[in-house]
């Protein structure tokens, strides 16, 4: 995180705003709007784009991916515009927490990869693009979405320093930790060889 420029009250305000933005369950909303049913009762029950894809609707999965990424980016960019960089990073972290633990869904949210990538793109777009490429490499080689997310999260903590954006290092580490924590079950299945491939119904 950068040196504090904002008051604690302002940081708390942006944390709340970020959390509320991040907690919007776009996967659930998109699935319902497009007549795909209750996403919590489909596949893994997760609210992210990977599970939306298990409905068989690629447009719905793409919309969920974009919207989940956008809400993380918007939280950061709004706080950066109206406050300062410290508030922007607090809002971004809160948006990630909101996506993973939304109050509207009894704190049972998504895995956070799309929101994580959206935040990185807004934080420092070269790092964000590199992290997206890391996702493509990880997922493409393994054909496992969660592997792409884990590879991208791990890579981001290196990329942000190597590419000269060290002020966002702590944020990237915290985001990566959340991604790994949210993927604990996936990591266990990867080790057991039972993790579903991309597009495969669980």
Image: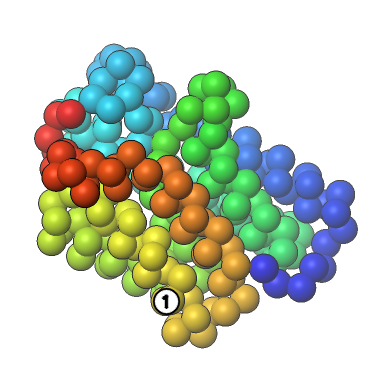
- Report if residue 115 is visible in the image: no
**Which residue is painted at 26% across and 39% down in the image?**
50
Question: Would residue 89 appear left or right of 83 to someone viewing this image?
Answer: left
Q: Residues within 10 Å of mark 1 (few under 14, many from 20)?
A: many
Residue 196 occupies quadrant:
top left
Quadrant of the frame with the C terminus? top left
**Which residue is painted at 21% across and 49% down in the image?**
191
Question: Would residue 182 appear left or right of 16 to someone viewing this image?
Answer: left
Residue 78 occupies quadrant:
bottom right
- Report if residue 173 is visible in the image: yes
Quadrant of the frame with the N terminus? bottom right
Comparing 176 with 22, the one in front is 176
Estimate the x, y position of residue 19 in percent, counting from the top left: 63, 40
Residue 132 in the image: above or below residue 107: below
Residue 180 in the image: above or below residue 59: below
Question: Would residue 150 appear left or right of 21 to someone viewing this image?
Answer: left
**Which residue is painted at 78% across and 45% down in the image?**
13
Comparing 107 with 80, the one in front is 107
**Which residue is painted at 37% across and 44% down in the image?**
184
Residue 142 occupies quadrant:
bottom left
> Number of numbered discs present?
1
Comparing 169 with 61, the one in front is 169
Dot 1 lies on which element? helix
Residue 124 in the image: above or below residue 199: below
Q: Which residue is mark 1?
A: 159
Estimate the x, y position of residue 26 in percent, counting from the top left: 43, 32
Estimate the x, y position of residue 89 in percent, counting from the top left: 64, 60
Residue 58 in the image: above or below residue 15: above
């Amino acid at each position: 995180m950068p040196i504090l420029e904002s008051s604690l009250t302002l940081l708390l305000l942006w944390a709340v705003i970020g959390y509320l933005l991040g907690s919007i369950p776009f996967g659930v909303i998109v699935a319902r709007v497009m007549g795909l049913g209750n996403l919590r009762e489909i596949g893994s029950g997760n609210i992210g784009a990977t599970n939306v894809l298990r409905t068989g609707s690629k447009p719905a999965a793409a919309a969920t991916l974009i919207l989940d990424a956008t809400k993380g980016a918007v939280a950061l960019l709004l706080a950066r515009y109206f406050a300062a960089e410290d508030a922007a990073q607090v809002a971004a972290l809160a948006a990630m927490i909101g996506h993973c633990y939304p109050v509207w869904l009894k704190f049972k949210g998504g895995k956070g990869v799309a929101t994580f990538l959206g935040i990185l793109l807004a934080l420092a777009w070269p790092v964000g693009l590199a992290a997206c490429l890391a996702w493509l490499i990880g997922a493409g080689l393994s054909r496992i979405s969660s592997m792409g997310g884990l590879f991208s999260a791990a890579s981001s903590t290196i990329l942000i320093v190597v590419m000269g954006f060290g002020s966002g290092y702590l944020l990237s580490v915290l985001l990566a930790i959340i991604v790994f924590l949210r993927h604990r079950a996936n990591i266990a299945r990867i080790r057991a060889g039972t993790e579903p491939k991309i597009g495969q119904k669980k």
